[in-house]
Image (cartoon, rainbow, N blue to C red):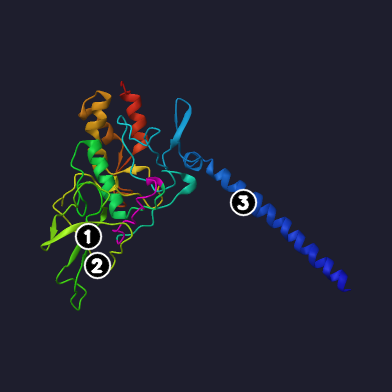
Amino acid sequence: MFLSNLIRQHWAALRALLVLTVIVGIGYPLFIWLVAQIPGLKDNADGSIIDVNGKPVGSSLIGQLFTDDKGNALPQYFQSRPSAAGAGYDPLNTSASNLGPESIVDTPGDPSLPADSNGYKASLLTLVCSRSKAAGELEGVDGKRPFCTGDGVGAVLSVIGPRDPRGNVVSPTKVVSVNEPCTTTQRPFLDTYESVRVECAKFGEDYSIGQIVPIEGAALDPAVPADAVTASGSGLDPHISPAYADLQIARVAKTRGVSANDVRQLVADHTDGRTLGFLGEPRVNVLELNIALDQKYPNKS
């Protein structure tokens, strides 16, 4: 009797498994695939792939780098925003840097080890500063921005000395530029702070005992837009702002031997407004713009 009940229970479970497998494992995916083939939905369902001369070159939903094999920006193309996804725009390694606004002090590298394996880790602030400096050099504008040194690192001091009850140093005895190691041949970005000479950072010393003070500086209105120096949360954002696109027009036009107005019109043609008129911000799809550039104004260099 017990064996008979056991067999019936297992047979019922097996039938339920088979039925659910057909419905959920075969029928439902097939139905969704058929719906996705409806005109107007098929392109998105297939990954929004962009073809040029019958050859896929990318997706309009995933950004990509326009650099040479050494990572240098190709001057004939508009550049995408930075990416923290793998080596850059890797859809299998989508991620952000996970660095927040309080990440302003670099992790120093051991000067006795090779630069690529000495343990150095840039803070978010230094990443922003270095990217702004590089973008300024590429586009021929001033890459300075608030809280950055002229060398493209975070302008941050550790101010050491007696503190008041609120934790502020009242009489500095030592001031260190924590993101400028003493291996550099240049002086710290600031000569003195409250009449105390600013020192460069020495590897192995702990400057967290001091009050960490970022220095804003005079570059209050940076020429390089924010999306040129910050990565998206996914690392796959295919768009840049119209401001960043506008910054690149002169370089692209000069490299391709066309007028800036011609390139500016092409940018305008590939600028999308806010979704539904009020969601998000205007944006430019970099891949689509660069494809249009190649088609209309082929690079002659």
- Marks 1 and 2 sit apart, C-alpha to C-alpha, by 9 Å
- Name the quarter where the C terminus is drawn: top left
Q: Which residues are magenta?
A: 102-116
Name the residue that disc number 2 marks: 210
Name the residue that disc number 1 marks: 176
Q: Quadrant of residue 170?
A: bottom left
Q: Secondary structure at mark 1?
A: strand
Q: Secondary structure at mark 3?
A: helix
* Residue 151 is a magenta residue: no
> Residue 269 in the image: x percent, y percent?
29, 34
Amino acid type of the residue that numbered disc 3 sits on in the rendered structure: Tyr
Amino acid type of the residue that numbered disc 1 sits on in the rendered structure: Val
2 or 3: tag closer to the N-terminus: 3
- Name the quarter where the N terminus is drawn: bottom right
Q: Main secondary structure of the magenta part?
A: loop
- Marks 2 and 3 sit apart, C-alpha to C-alpha, by 62 Å
Residue at the location (28% across, 45% down)? 131
In-front residue for pair 298/147: 147
> Residue 239 in the image: x percent, y percent?
34, 43
Residue at the location (31% across, 35% down)? 78
Name the residue that disc number 3 marks: 28
At label 2, counting other C-alpha atoms closer than 10 Å, the crowd grade (few under 14, some 14-19, many 20 or more) is many
Amino acid type of the residue that numbered disc 2 sits on in the rendered structure: Gly
Does 116 sit above or below residue 209? above
